[in-house]
Image (cartoon, helix red, strand yellow):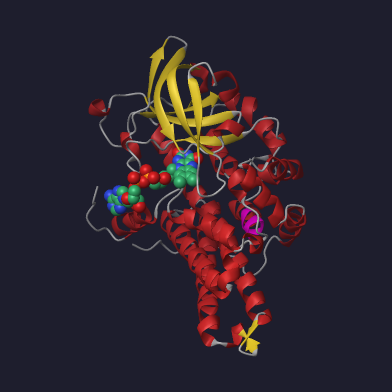
Amino acid sequence: MANDAAMISIPFGNDHPEIRDAIRAICKNFPAAYWRKLEDADEYAEEFVQALTESGYLAALIPEEYGGSGLPVRAAGVILEEIHVSGCNAAACHAQMYIMGTVLRHGNADQKRRYLPGIANGKLRLQAFGVSEPTTGSDTTRLKTRAVRDGSHYIVNGQKIWTSRAHKSDLMLLLARTKALEECTSRSDGLSVFLVDMREAVGKGLTLRRIDTMVNHQTNEVFFDNLRVPVENLIGEENRGFRYILDGMNAERILVAHESLGDARFFINKSVEYSKQRVVFNRPIGQNQGVQFPIARSYAEWKAADLMVRTGAALFEAGQPCGEEANIGKLLAADAAWNAAEACMQTHGGFAVAREFDVERKWRECRLMQIAPISTNLILSYIGEHVLGMPRSY
Ligand SMILES: Cc1cc2nc3c(=O)[nH]c(=O)nc-3n(C[C@H](O)[C@H](O)[C@H](O)COP(=O)(O)OP(=O)(O)OC[C@H]3O[C@@H](n4cnc5c(N)ncnc54)[C@H](O)[C@@H]3O)c2cc1C
């Protein structure tokens, strides 16, 4: 159940202070009004993503030999966290950080040379991750999108859903079935990963349809109709793709957990500030323990989640097993953020609903973390089965 003793060191306090300062400085140029305007116009945060790309921070995890800065996962997490503390939203670009890892770990030398430098310098966007499907949902290993080898190409047919940023991305990392489910020897067998060049694919077998959502998440349905993908765009070995995606899951969990930590801090800061200023019944509302305690509890929850996320990141960096810590960190951070969001809503009373206070936008955005990229139940099921050894439920 527990990890063997692992000699890891976990930083306390504001580690990577220079990164935190730099990200805050960038985010200052993208105030709440910028995000509200985007939402009104249903537009992608183009300028924000551009600024982050130019600063080099989006390439934090790409090794230096490919033009990135080769920073540890914790540093990348701090970047995402500070974006969220500032009230901005990293969903516009965070996927690049974890999708890129699949190419880095499992791509061949030619693929890495061909794609990673362009991703690092911003000429190529790898922001789309095509895994979820409408009919199979969380049951990923049953996905139906099919890729069939035909000489020097694979022919892809099927459908994805929730493929975020696909219309703003040059490349999509696609998980598709290359062996019929009935022939598979295990659940992880029969799926393969491809890098789809969207610049060539759209209109030639690939169609995108935007989904209107409660947050400005820029997400899509994707339809494949005899799309031809060159064989050289297969990542790693055929039929082993699900393992490659799983390999990247811990990094994904750790990175998005940092966003929730940032959200929690955003809400706590905002709640504390408002509760000191707002005077009702001749005293600041924060003087009432009914207002104060939910904020104090949120702070305690954030602090505990923060420690777990830091632990996951440190284990990951040390090459130690970290599935338990990465998953629990994600769960606790998302809960801390949601409870802090609720406290902030309540603290602001009627003004919480006024868009200019920016509470309701962040409240909606942070709710998503209970569902995507993985839903809370699926994390609990991981803990129940893989950590505690209870019977498998599905
Ligand atoms: C805004 C947004 C952006 C997204 N972006 C991407 C993306 O870029 N790429 C991508 O591939 N996907 C993306 N997703 C998809 C996301 O990963 C899924 O929505 C998520 O994994 C849940 O799958 P589902 O929606 O199919 O829910 P379902 O699988 O239909 O589940 C519905 C509910 O039932 C619960 N449930 C299902 N089975 C069980 C079980 N056995 N035990 C207990 N509870 C269970 C789930 O926890 C969930 O609460 C995005 C989703 C959203 C909403």
Q: Nearer the viewer, residue 325 or 79?
A: 79
Answer above or below: position of 354 versus 88.
below
Quarter of image, res 167: top right
**Residue 135, how many percent across, how many down?**
32, 36
Considering the image in quadrants, where does the N terminus appear? bottom left
Q: What is the magenta range? A: 80-84
Q: Nearer the viewer, residue 3 or 100?
A: 100
Answer above or below: position of 222 versus 273.
above
**Residue 40, how many percent across, how many down?**
63, 47
Q: Is residue 199 visible?
A: yes
**Residue 41, how many percent across, how many down?**
64, 42
Quarter of image, res 63: top right
Q: Residue at x 66, y 61 (%)?
A: 356
Answer above or below: position of 285 versus 82.
below
Judge from the rendering whether residue 61 lies leftward or rightward of residue 388; answer left or right.
right
Answer above or below: position of 341 versus 322.
below
